[in-house]
Image: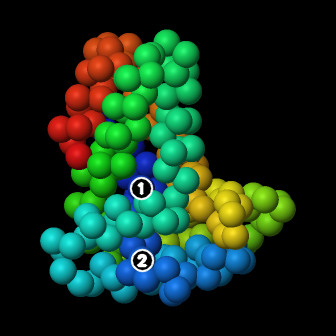
C-alpha cells in the first residue's frame, strides 16, 4: 500500500489528537465547540503516558467518529463485489487498522494548538474550518466534516491543506485491492492493527 501523503498524515493525526478521556468534557451540541473541545481535551491527554494512547484513540473512534460510515465509504466501489463474510472481516479489522496506522503519529501533535476559523452549520451536517499550529512548524488548515448523529455530532471526514482524507484513503484501498485482492487488504489491515 502506498504511503498516504504528508497532508493526509497530518489530517489523520489532527483527528487522532482529539483523544478524549471523558465524554462529559466534550461539548457535542455546537459544531465549533465540539471540534474545539474535542481537540483541546485531546492535546492535553496526549501529554500523558504513550502506552495508553491506543486505548484512548480506540475509545475516541467509537465515541466521536462515524467509524462504520467512514469504513463503508472507503470500500463503496467494492462492496457489491465482496461476500458478507469478507465485509464482516473488513468491518472487524477497520478500527484496529486506523489505530495501528496512526496511533504512533499522535505524539508529534501533543504541543499543537487549534483555532476555529469558521463554522458552516448546515442543519444535520456542519463543516468546521480550523488552523492547527505547532511550535516551529507551518500552520495546517483542517476542515472537519461533521454529521448530527443522535443527540450530537460525529466526525465523518477531514480535509487538510486541500487533501480530502477519505478520498485519499479510498484511492489507496482501491489500488491495493486491484493489485492484491480484497482478502489481502483485510489481512494487511489485521497485521497493521
Could one spot residue 136 in this view of the protein? no
Mark 1 sits on what residue?
12
Q: Position of residue 58 (x, y in %)?
A: 34, 61
Instruction: Find residue 77 and report its image quarter.
Output: top right
- The residue under the point 59% across, 73% down is 35
Could one spot residue 123 in this view of the protein? yes
Q: Position of residue 167 (x, y in %)?
A: 54, 37
Q: CA distance from mark 1 to mark 2?
A: 16 Å
In the rendered image, the vertical position of residue 163 relative to residue 132, given as above or below: above
Who comes first in sequence, dot 1 or dot 2? 1
Q: Position of residue 92 (x, y in %)?
A: 35, 40
- The residue under the point 42% across, 56% down is 12
Quadrant holding the N terminus: top left
State left or right for residue 82 relative to residue 109.
right
Crowd class of label 2 (few under 14; some 14 to 19; many from 20; radius 10 Å): many
Q: Position of residue 46 (x, y in %)?
A: 30, 78
Residue 20 is marked as 2
- The residue under the point 56% across, 36% down is 73
Amino acid at each position: 500500500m502506498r504511503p498516504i501523503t504528508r497532508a493526509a498524515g497530518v489530517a489523520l493525526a489532527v483527528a487522532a489528537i482529539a483523544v478524549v478521556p471523558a465524554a462529559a468534557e466534550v461539548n457535542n451540541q455546537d459544531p465549533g465547540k465540539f471540534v474545539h473541545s474535542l481537540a483541546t481535551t485531546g492535546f492535553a491527554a496526549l501529554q500523558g503516558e504513550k502506552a495508553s494512547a491506543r486505548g484512548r484513540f480506540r475509545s475516541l473512534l467509537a465515541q466521536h467518529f462515524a467509524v462504520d460510515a467512514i469504513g463503508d465509504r472507503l470500500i463503496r466501489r467494492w462492496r457489491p463485489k465482496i461476500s458478507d463474510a469478507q465485509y464482516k472481516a473488513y468491518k472487524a479489522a477497520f478500527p484496529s487498522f486506523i489505530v495501528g496506522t496512526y496511533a504512533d503519529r499522535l505524539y508529534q501533535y501533543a504541543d499543537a494548538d487549534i483555532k476555529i476559523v469558521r463554522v458552516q452549520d448546515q442543519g444535520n451536517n456542519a463543516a468546521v474550518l480550523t488552523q492547527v499550529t505547532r511550535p516551529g512548524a507551518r500552520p495546517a488548515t483542517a476542515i472537519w466534516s461533521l454529521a448530527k448523529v443522535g443527540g450530537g455530532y460525529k466526525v465523518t471526514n477531514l480535509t487538510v491543506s486541500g487533501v480530502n482524507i477519505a478520498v485519499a484513503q479510498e484511492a489507496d484501498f482501491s489500488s491495493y485491492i486491484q493489485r492484491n485482492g480484497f482478502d489481502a487488504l483485510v489481512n494487511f489491515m489485521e497485521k497493521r492493527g
